[in-house]
Amino acid sequence: MSLAKLSDVLIPARAEKYGVGAYDFTNMEMMLGILDAAEQTKTPVIIQFPHIDEFDEIIDLFAPMMVEAAKRARIPVVLHLDHGKTFAACKKCADVGFTSVMLDASTEVFEKNVELTKQVVEYCKPLNVDVEAEIGHVGEGEDLSSCQYTDPDEAKRFVEETGVDALAVSIGNAHGAYKAAPKINYEVLTEIEDKVSIPLVLHGGSGISDEDFKKIIRHGIAKINIFTELTQQVKQEMDKIPDTEMNMFTALGTIREGFRQRTLEKIELFETKPM
C-alpha cells in the first residue's frame, strides 16, 4: 500500500460516492494521530502540509518524515501540499517526494490562474505527481462575504485547459471556524458536477453539518479538507487534564489522540471505503 496519488484514491471515491478526508497537520504528533485512525479503519488517507511563511526551511525537515511514515503505513497515503502559493513551492514538494500538490491561484483572474496552474501541471506530470487547483474563491469562515462562487462553465474550461487532477470549488464553504452556519449552494454544485468529470474538492470542511457532508459527497465531492475540527478536539481533550498532570509529554500524547479521535469520526461520516 503506502504511497498513493490523489487520483488513486479520489477517482474510486467519486465513482462510488464516498469521501476521503484530507487532514492538515503541522507537527509529528498531529500526523501520527491521522495515520493511527486511517490504519485502524484500513482506509486511504490524505495527509497534507499547509504552505506557511517559513515554508522552505520547514518542508526540508518535514518531507523526509512524511515520506517515511507513508512508506511504513499499511494503507494508501497521499502526501499533499495544501494551498501552495507559488510554482517554486509546488516544485519543491514534487522534488522531495510529495505525491500531489495544490497550486492556489484562485485570487488571480481566470486567465492568470490557468497560466500558473498549467506551469505546475507541466512540471509535475513527468514526475507522476498529481495537481489540485481552485476556481472561484473559498474565503474565511469569519467573513463569508469573501467567498466567490465557482462558475460551472469556467470550471469546465479550467479543467480542460489545465489538465488538473482535482478541482477545489467554492459553493458556500469557507476556511476556519464559521461564525454563522454555512449554506451550501447545491444548484451551483450540481451544475459543476454535470460539467466536470474529475474529482471535486471541498475546502473548509470543519463546521459543515453531517447532512450537508453526505449530500455533497453524493454530488461529486471526493476530497474533504479538515483541520480546525481536529484542533478543537485537541483543546477538548486538553481541558480534561488536571493542571497537576499536564506536562510536555502529556500534551504531545493528547495532540496525537485528539487528531486520531476526530479523524475516526470523519472517516465514518464520509463512509470512506478500504482500498
Image (spheres, rainbow, N blue to C red):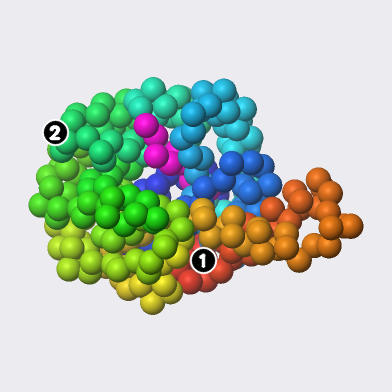
Q: Is residue 109 above or below residue 246?
A: above
Q: Which residue is more in the foreground, 267 or 116?
A: 116
User: Is the residue marked by circle 1 packed among few (<14), some (14-19), or many (20+) residues within 10 Å?
Assistant: many
User: Is the residue marked by circle 2 packed among few (<14), some (14-19), or many (20+) residues within 10 Å?
Assistant: few
Mark yes or no: residue 222 visible.
yes
Q: Position of residue 263 (x, y in %)?
A: 57, 61
Q: Is residue 82 magenta?
A: yes
Q: Residue at x 51, y 40 (%)?
A: 49
Q: Looking at the rendered structure, which numbered label has been put on residue 266?
A: 1
Give the image quarter of residue 116: top left
**Majority SS type along the magenta span:** strand
**The residue positioned farthest toward the bottom in the image shown:** 211
Q: Position of residue 12 (x, y in %)?
A: 36, 60
Q: Are marks 1 and 2 in contact (CB under 8 Å)?
A: no
Part of the protein shown in magenta: 77-85
Q: Residue at x 15, y 53 (%)?
A: 151
**What type is the residue that disc 1 sits on?**
Lys
Q: Is residue 131 above or below residue 151?
A: above
Q: Earlier in the sequence, mark 1 or mark 2?
A: 2
Q: Position of residue 163 (x, y in %)?
A: 22, 39
Mark yes or no: residue 198 visible.
no
For mark 2, give the secondary structure. helix
- Cα distance in 3D space between marks 1 and 2: 36 Å
Q: Which residue is more in the foreground, 200 or 165?
A: 200
Q: Classify residue 127 as left or right of residue 71.
A: left
Per the image, the residue denoted by label 2 is 111
For mark 1, give the secondary structure. helix
Q: Classify residue 81 as left or right of residue 259.
A: left
Q: Is residue 81 magenta?
A: yes
